[in-house]
Amino acid sequence: MRMLSRPDRGVVSGSREMRKRVEWWSEAMRPAIWLWVIGTVVWPGASGMAEDFRIVTKVYAGAEEDHESAPVAETLTLFAGGVVYDFLRSGDREEMTVFDPQRRRFVLLDPKRHVQTTLHFDGVLSFTAQVKARLEETGRKEFAAPTFEVRDAKERGPMAFVLDNPAIRYTVVGERVPSPAASTQYQQFADWYARLNTMRPGNAPPFARLRLNSELATRQWIPREVIRVVRMKRGLRVREFTMRSRHQVTWLLSQSDRKRIERAGTAMASYRVVGFRQYLDIPQETAAR
């Protein structure tokens, strides 16, 4: 997810729409536990200390034993000069996302339809704040300020931990970052990207992932593997839903990475600018118009 100079009124306004979306989240993800984190961005790039690196991520649905399954989504995330360029491929869908903390904005680009939209941080924070407020108003404060058990997962190696409560469990295998700046870059991108995804229809609020990101930052780690198990109770039965992501981190950028960044810059200069709602709702058949 026009150029916004203030919170995106088309997205953050409309109490009835917000009520419906939060109620949908609450029913669909009732057992999920979320922790609210909102902070001021202090991006290392502002002081010239930003690291350049790349992360290849593959996301799988299902338990670990389903290792033969194909990934449901793949992303290439490039950290370059204090800006982050994320390239998503999921099925026949492609998207480029440019995270620019100095300008306090996301730019979303659709290569198939040649359209783009901009979301400023104030709009993203306003939207997620409304989600938090609505959860509290409806008596779901435990979703906004949960407690987790954090323990080492030595069975998975020396750099692994579990974040757990009765509703959700994260198992994480990590690796150390080469500098505190790289840790901060990763956490802030991951936090803001989780908030951004909240604004897309069908996605849950970001609070559980924010808590996980905080734990990674405390340890100065970046994830190599994340397994999320959500437990949903229906009557006397408890069903578990598992998602896995694997991350390959390389602490330098290739020439092909630089070309991808150039491609994103060209797209920002040439793609048609639309509003966020229109960006989400434009039918695929309008791409050639």
Image (tube, rainbow, N blue to C red):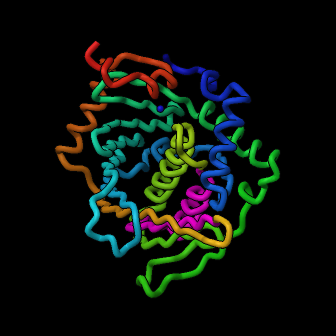
* Stretch in magenta: 206-233
Q: Position of residue 85 (x, y in %)?
A: 36, 41
Residue at 64%, 67% in the rendered image: 167
Above or below residue 284? Residue 150 is below
**Occupied quadrant, residue 95:** top left
* Residue 214 as seen in the image, left or right of residue 253: right
Residue at the outermost top position: 289
Above or below residue 17? Residue 228 is below
Residue at the outermost left position: 255
Is residue 31 visible in the rendered image? The answer is yes
Residue at 18%, 44% in the rendered image: 256
Q: Position of residue 274 (x, y in %)?
A: 45, 18
* Residue 26 as seen in the image, left or right of residue 75: right
* Residue 217 as seen in the image, left or right of residue 24: left
Q: Position of residue 97 (x, y in %)?
A: 39, 37
Q: Nearer the viewer, residue 143 or 153?
A: 143
**Occupied quadrant, residue 141:** bottom right
**Occupied quadrant, residue 96:** top left
Above or below residue 153? Residue 122 is above
- Residue 220 sits inside the magenta stretch: yes
Residue at the outermost bottom position: 155
Residue at 55%, 68% in the rendered image: 239
- Residue 240 sits inside the magenta stretch: no
Residue at 59%, 56% in the rendered image: 210
Is residue 218 visible in the rendered image? The answer is no
Q: Position of residue 196 (x, y in %)?
A: 53, 40
Q: Nearer the viewer, residue 275 or 262?
A: 275
